[in-house]
Amino acid sequence: MMRPLLATLVLATATTVTTAAAAPASASGDLAIRSVEVRPSDPVVGPSGSVRLVVDVVARGADRVSVVLEPGRAPSGDDEPGGEPEPDVIPSPPSGDAVPVPSVTPDPAVSSGSAVPAGVPLPGLGGLASAAMPGMMGASRAGGRPARRISSGEWETWRFFPDKPLSRWYPSGPWTVTATAVNARGERAVARVGFNLRRATEIEGLKVVRDGDGVRVTGTLIRVDPLGKVDYRPFAGQRVRICFRPAGSSRWKTVGEAVTRRDGWFTARVRVDGEGAWRAEYAGTSRYAADASPQRGA
């Protein structure tokens, strides 16, 4: 199992104000978090490249807001996030590579005169990464600029920009974003939201050929290698839908399905009336993204 700090991402606190529109609120002024939003809401990572996240926390009555991202489902009761076991093998970065730990990106729309508390890095874990821990923040960030804080009325949107993006080297599946707002009296409000980090899949080599009074559809489903040794590997034991769109129609309908073999290959023989286009679709899981093949004619 992956060490829990290895993929824990901490974004620094924002303190500068920029005016923008916000939703109306009651006049109570009590400390509260109305929402936490992650964009993109359904990030997908490929064998190379990465995905940059933006986190918006809408709160009122807060002097400070911080957010923490970590793998695992949102806790229930007194459980801590990050406790869900990871069934996939966690890929190890190639020798010399580091798992990126996001921090706050300077926002050109915000003044550079305000201090941003910076995370104190922990010692590296196995040479792969360091992680900043909440509660260790307090030093001014030298030369840095804060994330954006958007104010109007009582509700404020605190926007966080990780410098480092997510990539295939992070655990796939459920992640939890924990937002903590603190007021001048030291009172706290906590809200959590979850998202799934998915690895890419691809249906390749789709072929559609006439087979007697029917049509045979074949192809191969591959996924980003969970071991991290190659770009893609076959994806076995997955259900693939065979879809048909009649000529002159804009609607696809499922006419068959197949299960991938150990080598990712699938085959299905179906019967339909008339001409049209064919494609295969994979619905995806909480850890792997959906995909649809290019359409083919018989």
Image (tube, rainbow, N blue to C red):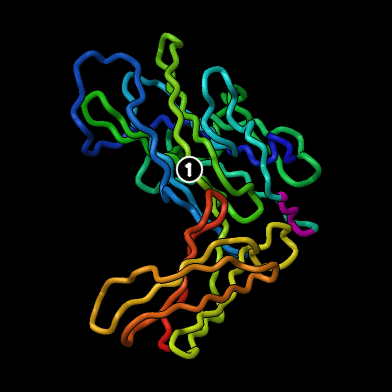
The answer to whether residue 20 is left or right of residue 45 is left
Task: Determine crowd level at label 1: few under 14, some 14-19, many 20+ residues with C-alpha closer than 10 A.
Answer: many
Q: Position of residue 224 (x, y in %)?
A: 63, 63
Please tell me which residue lies in front, 209 or 60. Answer: 209
Q: Quadrant of the N terminus?
A: top right
Q: Position of residue 2 (x, y in %)?
A: 73, 41
Q: Is residue 90 magenta?
A: yes
Placement of 113 over or under 264, stated as above or below: above
- The prevailing secondary structure element of the residues shown in magenta is loop
Identify the image quadrant of residue 55: top left
Pick out the residue farthest to the top. 185
Placement of 209 over or under 136, stated as above or below: below
Please tell me which residue lies in front, 226 or 167. Answer: 226
Q: Quadrant of the C terminus?
A: bottom left
The answer to whether residue 114 is left or right of residue 250 is right
Q: Residue at x 52, y 84 (%)?
A: 207
Placement of 284 over or under 213, stated as above or below: above
Please tell me which residue lies in front, 85 or 236. Answer: 236
The answer to whether residue 286 is left or right of residue 236 is left
Q: Residue at x 46, y 84 (%)?
A: 215
Start-end of magenta stretch: 89-94
The answer to whether residue 273 is left or right of residue 287 is left
Please tell me which residue lies in front, 254 or 84. Answer: 254
Q: Position of residue 240 (x, y in %)?
A: 51, 66
Amino acid type of disc 1? Answer: Phe
Q: Is residue 215 magenta?
A: no
- Could you say whether the residue bearing mark 1 is in a helix, strand or loop? strand
Q: Residue at x 49, y 35 (%)?
A: 177
Identify the image quadrant of residue 239: bottom right
Identify residue for label 1: 195
What number of labels is visible?
1
